[in-house]
Amino acid sequence: MRSGKMFKAITSFALVAAMVVPAIAVSPATADAKAKFSASSALLATGQKKSVSVKGAAKKSTFSWKSSNKKVATIKKGKKSKATITAKAAGTAKITCVVKKGKKKSTVSGLTIKVRQKITSFAMQNKDSKACTSQTIKTGEKFELKGAINNNKSGSTTNQTVKWTSSDTKIAKVTKKNSNSATVTGVSAGTATITAKVAPKSKTESKEVTCKITVSKEKEDPKKDDKKDDPKATPTPAPLLPAGTLYKQKYNVTRWYNPATAAQSPTKHSHDGYKNNNFAIWMVGFFDNQYSTDEEAYRAYGPDLKNASNAQYKDGHDFRGEELRVKGDFSYEGTNQKTILFQINYTKPLDYPILYKWEDGSSKLDKAPQAERNNVKNNIKASGYGKYGAESLKPGETGKLDINFTIPKDAINGDKDEATGENYGIYLYFPNRPDGVLAYRGDNTFHFKNFSITY
């Protein structure tokens, strides 16, 4: 009797095992495995190609590649999970890939391609774009030099790196001003050579130019009253922001499309227009000056939120993990913009998250399901005016920002300075061209005022 029951038990167990084991063995792998790109960023010269691939995708998956800006970089599908990127023009493009297996699919993102012009020529010039191989200045005097790339062709400075050095900093020191210009200051009488090197890490395109600087000692005037006439004797202290304020916009800022001389510009300051300036709209709300878009005249972003200074934090402070508040007014004249974004430029744990957007339906996102809110590209938690966004702006209307937000403690900007190898800081910004946002159009003029960042 026991033997019969035991036989039935064994038989039942075997039948169950026969049904269960095959079911486990043929379970297909999903397409949303932890896939990622073989690289997170790349700097290419126009015409240069780069091979990339998706790693960690399920076997027998299909891959569909896309570039956010085909004018900057195109991508061609290769064998299996591989593809080839071709650099077309100076600028930035984001690469994405849809990995699909059966009915399941996932999107891989996080690859930023920066393209610079291939360097065909490099020359030393003064601020007036005239050749400059030697210059005499006095002690304390400042003089601007520029490394002219490709005869100052439009877009030639985009994503370029120029490294500046002085042969003797006790005679003349050089300070980098922006992507391709620097300020030379006479320190003491003597001669020094200023060297500019473009694409210093490139084995094939790196070029070097020099300028001989002669510093003469300024003659002392015995009748001169230093206390009254010398601004160095009675310096005017820079205004300090009150505790709790990281940034406060001092001047209303306007961005025009076309270049203009000082006589043509409404503010009486020359500007190169955002037609030719990749940074003309980038972080525009935070240029703390009255100028227009002359990148040669200034280059001042808002505070680096990973290393910010003010009256309280003179040596810099890391505001990641702390709540911040940003306020400001934005408007434009010209073609209606269907989408306008306000973002933060870190790449991890999110990729360039959106703080706020002007687009039809955005004002309702705070009441929408979380899944729908996540469709607002990588948005982070925010509170305050509108939370996530407002309806699209029309020309002449003012879009207001007033939101509180917190940057994750582990946030980093994965983009690096080619010259130093260091990661760039974390800034708030209005993107200049992604997805057609704030497009380069001759009939668009942008206005920014009342911007502030507090904590």
Image (cartoon, rainbow, N blue to C red):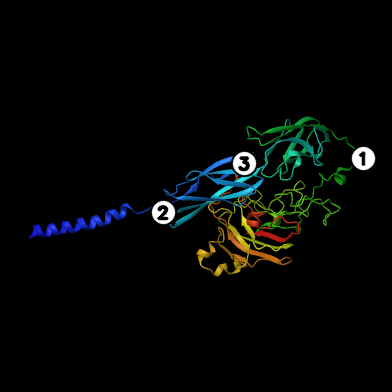
Horizontal side, residue 343 vs residue 103: left or right: right
Q: Earlier in the sequence, mark 2 or mark 3?
A: 2
Under tag 3, what secondary structure? strand
* Amino acid marked by disc 1: Lys
Which is more N-terminal, label 1 or label 3? 3
Residue bearing mark 2: 30
Q: Is residue 149 visible to the viewer in this orientation of the structure?
A: no
**What residue did someone put label 1 on?**
223
- Mark 2 or 1: the one toward you: 2
| Badge 2 amino acid | Thr
Q: Which mark is residue 44?
A: 3
Front residue of 405/322: it is 405
Residue 88 locus on image (x, y percent): 64, 44
Q: Secondary structure at mark 2?
A: loop
Where on the picture, by quarter, is residue 284?
bottom right
- Separation of marks 2 and 3 at Cα, in angstroms: 34 Å
